[in-house]
Image (cartoon, rainbow, N blue to C red):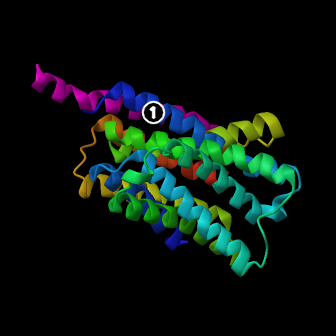
Amino acid sequence: MRDAAAWSKLMSIAFVANGLGPFGLKILTAQGLSAQQSKYLFWWYAGGSLFAAAAFARGWKRLRAKELVLGAAMGLCSLGGQSFTGLSLAHGMPGHIVFPVTTGGSLFFVATAGIVLFKERVGPYGLVGICLGICSLVLLSIS
Amino acid sequence: MFLGLASFGLLGVFHKLADVKEASPKAITAILYLVSLFFVFISLTVFQKDTPFTSGRILAIGLPFGLFAGIAILAFQAGIRHGDITTSWLIINLSSAIPTVASILIYKEAVTPTKVVALILIPIAILLLWKERRQSDRPRRAADA
């Protein structure tokens, strides 16, 4: 049963928590520890793993194959996205090209997949919101 | 760069697929993080010939901020059950306004005109997406009545 109030509540939590997540990297850089980014990334994922493993503590015996496959694929995509973006920057691709293409492009990719593959219908508010959202993120990534 | 785009895009598609397949949000979040942690560990130890052991400062920053990211993924995966990936994926991505604003307030980062325009557009986009979500329930409610 789809519930708009539950969606608003959970998306608000996701919005705030997801916004706070990457801020650690800024603190790391500000403290002059950016050379230790790989170690930081390990402990960053460890923090997420501890929380997620604790949240799922009673469910390990009921873990299904589809959850294992999809979760692993998502983990690889998350890591792959960060690694490939980092690699293109390391190979001299300027940030003002890499970030708008990866951010704006992936948003467009997901929106298209939602409409074409999952037959989601987007109304006029949604279409304008998506366009404004993609524009704002592209602007933010080049600023 | 395009592989990065494809990876992030596929991540969004898999979030929706997990919902369609009725996978448990807690299971998905746990596996996602443990698999990522495993590969970061491999990258660190095998390719960089290093160890994860480090100063308390890195631990003190990494663990809590990683925990926030874990909460975000779990809330998102649970929330997608009540909405569309088309709009939800954008909402979670728009959260990059938070580190931008925090950097301006805490680290006195420069406020450029481009940043100002982006930060004005973000709440407008969220408001429109929220309105879209409420609107999308109306035909269903009417049909139920």
Magenta extent: B116-145
Which kind of residue does numbered mark 1 sit on?
Answer: Leu
Q: Camera-side residue: A130 or B85?
A: B85
Which residue, given by chain and number where applicable, does mark 1 sit on? A10
On the rendered image, what quadrant is the N terminus of chain A found in? top left
- Place residue B48 in its image quadrant: bottom right
Q: Residue B78: percent from the left, percent from the top?
A: 40, 40
Residue A125 seen anywhere in this rendered image of the structure: yes
Give me the residue at 44% from left, 52% from top.
A60
Q: Is residue B136 magenta?
A: yes
Q: Residue B124: percent from the left, percent from the top?
A: 49, 32
Q: Secondary structure at mark 1?
A: helix
Give me the residue at 60% from left, 70% from top.
B39
- Place residue B100 in its image quadrant: top right
Residue A80 vs B108, above or below: the answer is below
Q: Is residue A56 left or right of residue B38?
A: left
Q: Is residue A114 left or right of residue A79?
A: left
Q: Is residue B6 left or right of residue A47?
A: left
Number of other residues with Cα within 10 Å of mark 1, as a class: few under 14, some 14 to 19, many 20 or more: many
